[in-house]
Image: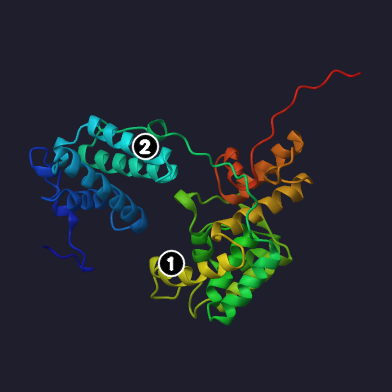
Amino acid sequence: MAKADNHRFDYRKFRRIPSRRNFGYGKLLTFAAHIVLLWLYGYGHHQTRHAHHVRFRRFVAFLRTEFQIVDARHIQKHHLETYAVMLNGLARTGEMKLSYAQNLLSSVNTVMQGFRRDYAVWIAPAEAVGRRSQVRTVMPGGDWKQVEEVVEKLQSEGNARAAAIVLLARAFGMRYREAVLGDLYRMKREVSSGHVTILEGTKGGRRCASRRIPIGERQQHALDFALQVRPDGSANLLAEAETFKGFLDTVAKTARPVLKACGIRCFHDLRAARMIELYESISNQPAPVRGLSPDAGRDTEARAQVALQSGHGEHRTSVAYIGRKPYRRAVESSS
């Protein structure tokens, strides 16, 4: 097999040939799916490619068992619909999470679109297995007492970089990737302006100069701590020869049990805790996730800031952090 300069084989030698097995991408369906994903994403987006491939392999096993299909050219929409019915059944009985069932179908959609270059074999995941609710109904862990406990334990274990991520996620509401890849030097320079901008590691390439986080004592401490523990010669928390995936498989894995032991379910809950804190400081009222009914007017203004500072394009995504948006009640007639 031909080798590229970086010791990866050259997937570009595979080209789509409709008359050949798996459209010319390889003899085995799972391998052909791997090549298709390389054509779609290149060698970047490793985690995305890996997730799609793992999920698609489940569909391949289903096709082989139920229909004896081993060639992508023979896959029709009714095969995908049958697969969706099976996943729907698993989701309804609780044997599979609804979110995972949707992700399985989404991956099949992606790979089949890559194979066929059309949407003839495509299905709407939400319509096939049901819609999932992303409305937060339970308060996340991540109050500052818990955060300080986590940081202390991680430092005692020699995992100071994980402690820095915890502080950055809680203080700035950063995603895990943003906390790892953020340019700490640039952020430090911006402190004098009273805010810092989150630019590196953003989801879906949403680099937005308007995502400015006000600097307070907590933010200043988190940034100073991250600068102290960053590897020599690096502007972020990655070492010079370290990959994000390698960091994820080592630092993150050792940190998660500490988070759970201190009452914090995952890194994302730190981000949610920050957004609840932000909402309540702007609206001057409790967040809806606490089970209360906030004033709709102040709620709208606070949600706009939550969406902006969390790096989302739509205000409706705020429900995942602070709870359901209140409905305006009809004004009662004056007595």
Expressed as whole percent of the image width and height from the top left, the position of residue 109 reads 30, 39
Is 64 or 318 nearer to us in this picture?
Answer: 64
Considering every residue shown, the one lying at the far front of the view is 93
**Among the 4 quarters of the image, the one containing residue 334:** top right
Marks 2/1: CA–CA distance: 34 Å
Q: Give left or right: position of 215 versus 202.
A: right
> Which residue is at a point 22% across and 46% down the rendered structure image?
60
Determine contact: label 2, label 1, CB under 8 Å.
no
Locate the N terminus and report the quarter of the image it occupies. Answer: bottom left
Q: Is residue 157 visible to us here?
A: yes
Residue 7: percent from left, percent from top: 21, 68
Disc ID at residue 313: none
Q: Can residue 236 be seen by looking at this rendering?
A: no
Q: Residue at x 14, y 37 (%)?
A: 73
Whichever of callouts 2 and 1 sits on the residue coming sooner in the sequence is: 2
- Snapshot quadrant of residue 270: bottom right
Q: Quadrant of residue 313?
A: top right
Determine which of the numbered discs, if any, sits on residue 248 in the image: 1
Instruction: Give neighbour class at mark 2: few <14, some 14-19, many 20+ (Cα, 10 Å).
Output: some
Visual colour scheme: rainbow
Front residue (pair 284, 80): 80
| Image height of 131 relative to 259, above or below | above
Badge 2 amino acid: Gly
* Residue lying at 51% horizontally and 70% vertically, measured from the top left: 255
At a point 35% along the width and 41% down the height, the residue shown is 106
Left or right of 301? Residue 80 is left
Say what secondary structure mark 1 lies in: helix
Q: Nearer the viewer, mark 2 or mark 1?
A: 2
**x then y, percent, for residue 291:** 71, 42
The extreme right residue here reads 335
Q: Which residue is mark 2?
A: 89
Viewer-side residue, 174 vs 157: 157
